[in-house]
Image (cartoon, rainbow, N blue to C red):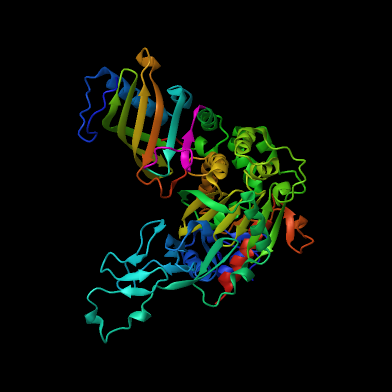
Amino acid sequence: MATEFTAETIYDLPPSDLVLPDRVAGRMYTDPAIFELEMTKIFERTWVWVAHESELPRGGSFKSTFVGRQPVIVTKDRKGNIHTMVNRCRHRGASLCEKRSGHVNGFTCPYHAWSYGLDGQLRGIPYPDAYEGVMDKSALSLKKLRTESYGGMIFATFNEDAGPLEDFLGDVRLWIDRFMAQGGGYPIKVIGTHRFKFKGNWKIQLENTTDGYHFPIVHRSWMASVDAETAEMMSFMTDPTALTHDLGNGHSVMQMVPEHSDLNDDDGSEPLQPRFDGLAAELKAQGLNDAAIRKLVRAVHGTGFNLNLFPNVSMSSSFFRVLRPVSVDETHIEHVALGPDGPAEIVDPVNRTRLRAHEHFQGPFGFGTPDDSEGWDRVQRGAQGAPEMPIMVNRGLAREKASPEGWPTSHVTDETGMRAAYDQWKQMMSDD
Amino acid sequence: MTEAPTNTASSMLSLTDPRVVRAIELIWREAALLDAKEYEDWQALYAEDGIYVIPIDRAAESFDDVLNMVYDDARMRQLRVARMTEGYAIAAVDAATTVRNVSRFVLASVSDQEVALKAGQILVAYKRGRHDLWAGDVDYVVRLGATPYEDRLVRKVVRLIDADDAVPAAGFLL
């Protein structure tokens, strides 16, 4: 096992030697061969988030997306079962569906009109007599991925031998339950998606959602533009109760606003922010009582934590951040806005407020995202230099301790979550 | 009285109509200010009740109940200009250099009070060896003042051709 990286050895080390307890090799961001291995050893082996259940509201709903680099379609069939299938016709390989989402009875390939059901079964072939005695139609379903969900979060994997999703999530489930409480008494639904791309490796984004340290520096511009209460709420740099926990299997949770970690735990002492007075009045006019209003308004900012799931989704305060690796130095990211799903007269005013708050920070023209993206671009460019010099992920290592639950824990500005993710990366990249 | 062309696609843009010329001059002035990153002056071209929008849904006509890339009223424009100019935003400090052309004007409606135009905008953004192409249709509504100096934008909607796809994160405005 290497204990340091040198200019002579850095390109000879196997991937598993590129992660040390307190540092990783910059080569992990820049080496195309490592990216290729990551696609097969990580993205085609583990559970990858593909959809939220609200994106598949009824039988016939579909969403097209990616698992690693592979295009997939996620569907809900008439019985309510969810399927994830490679978006590729079994005949000559054409993509079946180029729409992002919608509602269909099945999929017909535009090339030779082979048609498939919502469960991927091959249903029809034009002029089939030429296939008699050649092939068995029943063996030519779309290639399916295992699909399982927890708390409305739908994951798929190419790995038939992967353990159950719930085992992979482990203690993350508690935090998913807490995240979903931001519906304020209603379920959560997707209310819009920002999409942007940056010229950098996917792991730079993976690190970022568990990087409390960058927040007041990179996001000073956003902090300067919000009301005093919101800025105060995000002033966690010196708050000793703001903690990051390593939840195992590469997952971690970063509690920026610990008093909002469990939104159901409300002693009523925290005043609602005055900027939401108008929203509260609108809800009152709809006949909601003060307790119901408080529940919805207090949750407008979402939960007080970022829950980072390895390898591709973060449940981040009030939205999902989904990464898609495109190449060693290009990543596409979705910022999926969320809000309560209920009667329009109640949830529409809440969701308008949430949409405006999401636009304020997120997306390609938000007050936060472009600055993040600039930082990540700099990492990708800078990491080309001195490949033997490590990327440091040692912040807070000496003050990391086990929480009562047994989770390795340190301050929210520490790099505990990155170390958790890289431990998992190392393990998966070492597997044969 | 508003004179709306009966057929937008075939409507002729009258460059002899001084109201239309004034609107186009304002649009070109706005484009030049954005390329020059003179955001305070840019902001002053908007009416107090004006909106500046970059929707995700290219076909959207109302923006309240959907997610947009930008949906700025006067308050948000003020905050955005502060962000672009105060020096804290690393994306704005190191923003791409941009050059844009706005043309292909089609007249939607004209009156003595207001001119509505639809245009095409092609913008090239250069930064660190990369050229990004930003193309879109743009809707403008210009409110005519007592003099051309008092003409103001009341609506600008930039409908990117790739609005619902992944675009780069930007340190400039469209």
Can residue A278 be seen in the rendering of this structure? yes
Question: Which stretch is magenta?
Answer: B59-74
The residue lying furthest to the front in this view is A287
- In the displayed structure, does residue B112 sit left or right of residue B13? right
The residue lying furthest to the bottom in this view is A133
Most foreground residue, A182 or A91: A182
Most foreground residue, B140 or B126: B140
- In the displayed structure, does residue A266 sit left or right of residue A424? right
Q: Quadrant of residue A130?
A: bottom left
Taking the spot 41% from the left edge, 73% from the top edge, the residue there is A143
The residue lying furthest to the right in this view is A404
In the rendered view, tell whether residue A23 sits above or below residue B103. below
Can residue A21 be seen in the rendering of this structure? no
Q: Quadrant of residue B41?
A: top left
Most foreground residue, A240 or B120: B120
In the rendered view, tell whether residue A423 sits above or below residue B93. below
Q: Position of residue A18 (x, y in %)?
A: 59, 65
In the rendered view, tell whether residue A92 sits above or below residue A181. below
The reply to whether the magenta stretch includes residue B60 is yes
Q: Main secondary structure of the magenta part?
A: loop
In the rendered view, tell whether residue A201 sits above or below residue A363. below
Q: Position of residue B26 (x, y in %)?
A: 35, 23
Q: Position of residue A390 (x, y in %)?
A: 61, 57
Taking the spot 36% from the left edge, 62% from the top edge, the residue there is A97
User: Which corner quadrant holds the N terminus of chain A?
Assistant: bottom right
User: Which corner quadrant holds the C terminus of chain A?
Assistant: bottom right
Q: Position of residue B52 (x, y in %)?
A: 44, 32
Taking the spot 56% from the left edge, 58% from the top edge, the residue there is A313
The reply to whether the magenta stretch includes residue A92 is no
